[in-house]
Each structure stands twice: as structure tokens, then as C-alpha cells.
Image (cartoon, rainbow, N blue to C red):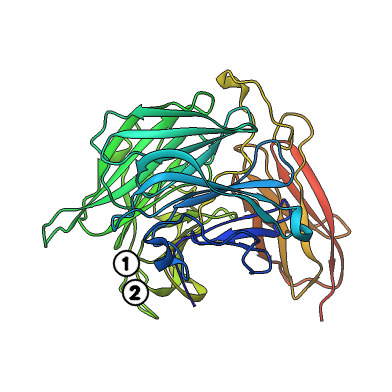
Amino acid sequence: MKLTGTQSNISDSLGNILFYSNGGWIADATGDTMINGSGLSPSVFSTVYNEYGFPAPNMQIALPFPDSTNQYILIHQTIQDVDLNSIELNYSIIDMIQNNDKGVVVTKNAIALNDTILTGLTACKHANGRDWWIVALKYDSDIIITLLLTPAGFTQISYQSTGLPKHNNYINTPIFSQDGKRMVFSQYIPTGNTTAPYQNEIRLFDFDRCTGLLSNGKYHILNDYIFGGGIAFSPNSNLLYASTAINIYQYDLNAANIWQSEILVAQFDTFSVGGFTDFCWSYLAADGSIYISPCNTAIFFTRIVNPDTLGVNCNVNLHSVPLPCFQFNAHVNHPNYYLGCDTSLGCPCLSANSILENGQHDFRFRVYPNPVVNNFVNIGYILPQNKSGILKLYDVNGKQLYTQGLPPWSNEQSIKLPQLANGIYNLRIESGGYFMSKNLVVMNE
């Protein structure tokens, strides 16, 4: 099997998969095509990509529908021409309580926007903690389009000129920082020069979650002129990573001059098992690490283990994550689903979900499997907004046996505990002055 390009999925609060899509269809948790889930994003090109997925990353994004407990929305792009541009932005609505909780697509291929846009979508939670901002890039312009999704549907579409050079008609991967205060996208432009075939660019903006306005646009051209486009923020939103096929760069977003803070943190080492494992698209995952897919058909990802750390100590592990199948040019597209209200921006809090508001914090702490066998355990949690955390393990006498830092906005970890005798232990998570504990049973074979 080979996975390419567009992938999106969404899970429930316990991490159970609800549905996923490759751009051409929507599948339920069992892997079957969901009822009414075929024929997504129809165009003269779409059937070519149905088997392995649409060819570019970030062409769709899955969100919980505002104020709904059972409906989700998949926002997706068509493929209009060989440059992968879209002439409209589509959406489909999934009702997860139908068909015995396996879901049914109740609205399919509805039109959210009639305009020509480039490949690449992203989303950010509104400062009211309920609604969503969706961002697309208008073709052959310097314009960024924002759409506001509310319980009433798409209620606002805005066009903003950035004042920067036009974006090109090639693949883009826009993303928001985890705190929602910045948006960035990268792009590559063929130059026609055989010795320097591509120009790689970064475009960085401040973002107001209340108004949806972008400001303070910054523009940077990377020095190595080969294929590139990978981009990712660190969990604490203080660092930015950009890559070409052969180099990974880090930028300090708190520096007086962001682009002059550039540090080369990794270089491609020509490793090839199943294909060259170079650097292509980047993804900040739930464990707080950044995973970088190769630009070629290959079976390994590169991992930035400590992306909140300045300099080479961010610990880039080249081709360290084996994959169960060949993949090419692929990553999922997840916004920060847990970003809550921010009334300091002038918006009232409209979220019915108070897990990230002031008061007693609900970590939604879960431990599995429990009992633990062979010292491997998984934990799920939600930290207070913009806070890092710490995990501690104690025996019945209160002796601390293990500790591990938890990056801000991370929510899943797979942990190998030290060798423990059979018995009952206490696993405690701490962050922002709050804590929560769970009993852990160890039952070695």
C-alpha cells in the first residue's frame, strides 16, 4: 500500500477514530466507505487520485461543527488543473449518530466559496472558543481569504491583501501556531534555472482570533534553491521550522530579527531504504514532536524530538520513525482543537466546553492499558492553555520513580516506564498549578 498527499481524520475525545478521508472518499472507523461518502470533490481530475489520495497535502480539514455534539464538517478542495488549483471550496457534513454510530454523510460537496484558490487549507479556533476561522489563498494574488464557520454555517467571507509579493500557483501548506497568534505558509517556485531550480519562501503573519485579521506580514527566501516547503511551529509557539529537501532550519520568533536568527539544525544524509528519506512536509503531532515526511516514496519519517528547544539541541532524529507502508508527500492536517476562549481580545466566550477556562482544570486524564504489561503505557490528557506539564510516577510509599515533561498543547504520549514490580502505583499529571492522579496497576507476565 502507498499513501500520498491529502489525508485528514478526526477522533472523539478518547482518541477513537471517527472517520478519515483521502480527498476522494470518506471512510468510517471500520475502514468502509461511509454511506454517501464516495464521489468527494468531483472534477475531471479527481477520479485519477481516488485510490491513493489527492496528490497535495492540506487539501482538506476536518472540524467538529460548532455547538453540535454529533456533527462534523469536512472542508475540501477540488482539483481543477494540473497545477492543482481549485475553482471552489467544498464542504461535507457528517452525522456520527446515524448508521449505528458509524456515521452518514448528510451533506456532500456543498459550496462554501466560489473562487480560484491555491492548494492548502488551515483553520484556527475563534477567540470565542466556539467558532472556526478557515484560511485559503487566492490564486495569482497577494490575497488571503478567511471564512468564519459558526453554528449557522459559513457566515462571513473576508479578503485581505497582505502587501507581500503574489503567492504562486504551486503547493502551499498554511498553518497556525498552537496559541493561535500567528499564521505561516511556505511555498516553492520553479525558477527555470538548472543549477538553482526552486526558490523557497516563508510568509509569516500575526493573527487576531477575534476579528480574523492578519497583520505584520514578513517575507523570507531560503538560501538553498531546491525543492522545499515543509513548515511547522513548536508546541510553545516560540520557534518556527522550515525545510527544503536537504536542510531543516529553525527560527526564533521572539528575536528582534526573526530571519537573522536562522539556525541549520539538520541536513539530509542520503539515507535510502525504500526511497530517499529527505525532508518534505512537516506535522506537529499530539506527542509534541514534529514529524517530517520524505519527498520521495519511502518508509521512514524524520522526527524533531524536542522542538521547543533552541538550536541543535532540538534533537532532529533522521529517518527514525518506520512506517507500516510506503508513503509519498503525505501528512494529516490537524488544527489545535483544544484552543479555548481568549476574552482579552474583546470577544465574549461562547464555548459550552469549559475544559480550558479558569477554575478547576479538567485534564481528561486517561491511562491505557491498565493494568500495564511489560512496562509500556499510553496516556491521554489536555493541559491548560499555553502551559507545559509534567508526569510523575510514585510507589505506594510516595517515592517518586519516574518523571517526564509534557510539551504545551501535547495530548498523547507512549511511555516506557522503568522496570517495576507487580503492584499498584500512582501516576500524577501537573500543569498550571493543577494536578490529577490515576492509579496504575502493573501486572508483568
Residue on which disc 1 sits:
268
* Residue 260 point in image, percent of width and height: 28, 40
* Residue 269 point in image, percent of width and height: 32, 71
* Residue 29 point in image, percent of width and height: 68, 64
Q: Amino acid at mark 1?
A: Phe
**Which of 364 and 140 lies nearest the eye of the viewer?**
140
**Which of 352 and 92 lies nearest the eye of the viewer?**
92
Direction from residue 208 to residue 222 in the image, left or right = left
* 111 vs 224: above or below: above
Residue on which disc 2 sits:
276
What residue is drawn where x is 65% and y is 33%? 151
**Which of 215 and 31 lies nearest the eye of the viewer?**
31
Total marks drawn?
Answer: 2
Q: For the residues carrying marks 1 and 2, which lies nearer the camera in this image?
A: 2
Q: Amino acid at mark 2?
A: Phe
Marks 1 and 2 in Cβ contact (< 8 Å): yes
